[in-house]
Structure formats: structure tokens, C-alpha cells
Amino acid sequence: MGYAYDDQNIFARILRGEIPNKTVLETAHSLAFEDIRPQAPVHVLVIPKGKYVSYDDFARNASEAEIVDFVRTVGEVCRMTGVALDAGEGFRAIANSGGAGVQEVPHFHTHILGGRGLGRMLQPA
Ligand code: 5GP
């Protein structure tokens, strides 16, 4: 069994242009856009254009060109939003995955959060 991809997920619809988004950066293989419910002053989602469900799906099945493009896009978003460590105060990159990871949208995405102190990574269970 593989990673079943739902073509109707909200990020698939954003990629098809069916739903508007506030684009931060678009590249050959990736799209970065503002999260609709920002949890920090900087809250950008970076997604591959390819149909990958989760981080592990992307890491195992994406092409090297897609992976390089995605990682470079994350870096560029950090620079553009002012959170990169050469000029800014830092950030958190989060990729919630699956049920235990509480992933709401089943298209791989990384949250880039910053612009304020973010506290510890996890609250005690
Ligand atoms: P997850 O819980 O899957 O890691 O995060 C999904 C994120 O997608 C949430 O932070 C949520 O606010 C965001 N989101 C859900 N629907 C939309 C939408 O239609 N547009 C945008 N820009 N973000 C969305």
C-alpha cells in the first residue's frame, strides 16, 4: 500500500487555483503562502507542487529536484520574512504528519513560524 493522495484536499485546490492564497514565493516545484489562521506574526506554509501526503512520503518518494527546490524555498522564505538567523531572531519549522502528528491537511507542508518567542516545542502530555 502507498500513500493515498486526496485530490480534493484544500492545498490541492490552492495549487489548481480554485482557492485564492497569499503567495510568498512560487518556484518550479514549490509554493509558499500565508497560513489562513496565523499562530505567530510570521506563519508561512511551504508545500511541494507534487502530490505528497506527508513528510515521510515526500522524503521517500520525491525526486531530488523536488527536494532541493523545497528545501531552498524554505530557506528563501526564512530570509524573506526576516526570521533567518543571519538577520532575524529565529523560527520554528513544523511538519505535522498523520494522526498522531495532528495533520489537518493531507498534502505535505512545513509551517514556518516566527516573529515572537515560541515557547518550548511540546507541552507535557
Ligand atoms: P496542519 O494541522 O495540517 O499541520 O496545518 C494545516 C494548516 O493549514 C493550518 O495551520 C490551517 O490554518 C491552514 N489552512 C487550512 N485551510 C487553509 C486555506 O484554505 N488557506 C490557507 N492559506 N491555509 C489554510
Image (tube, grey):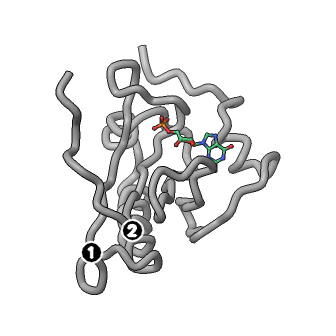
- Residue in view at x 31 percent, y 76 percent: 84
Relative to 87, residue 28 above or below: above
The image quadrant of residue 23 is bottom right
Image quadrant where one finds the C terminus? top left
Q: Which mark is residue 89?
A: 1
**Residue closer to the observer: 89 or 23:** 89
Residue 89, percent from left and from top? 27, 74
Lateral position of residue 84 relative to residue 25, left or right: left
Residue 68, percent from left and from top? 36, 63
Q: Which mark is residue 42?
A: none
- Residue in view at x 32 percent, y 38 percent: 60
Residue 46, percent from left and from top? 49, 56
- Residue in view at x 37 percent, y 31 percent: 97
The image quadrant of residue 27 is bottom right
Relative to 82, residue 125 above or below: above
Cβ–Cβ below 8 Å for labels 1 and 2?
yes
Relative to 6, residue 109 above or below: below
Q: Which residue is mark 2?
A: 115
Relative to 55, residue 67 above or below: below
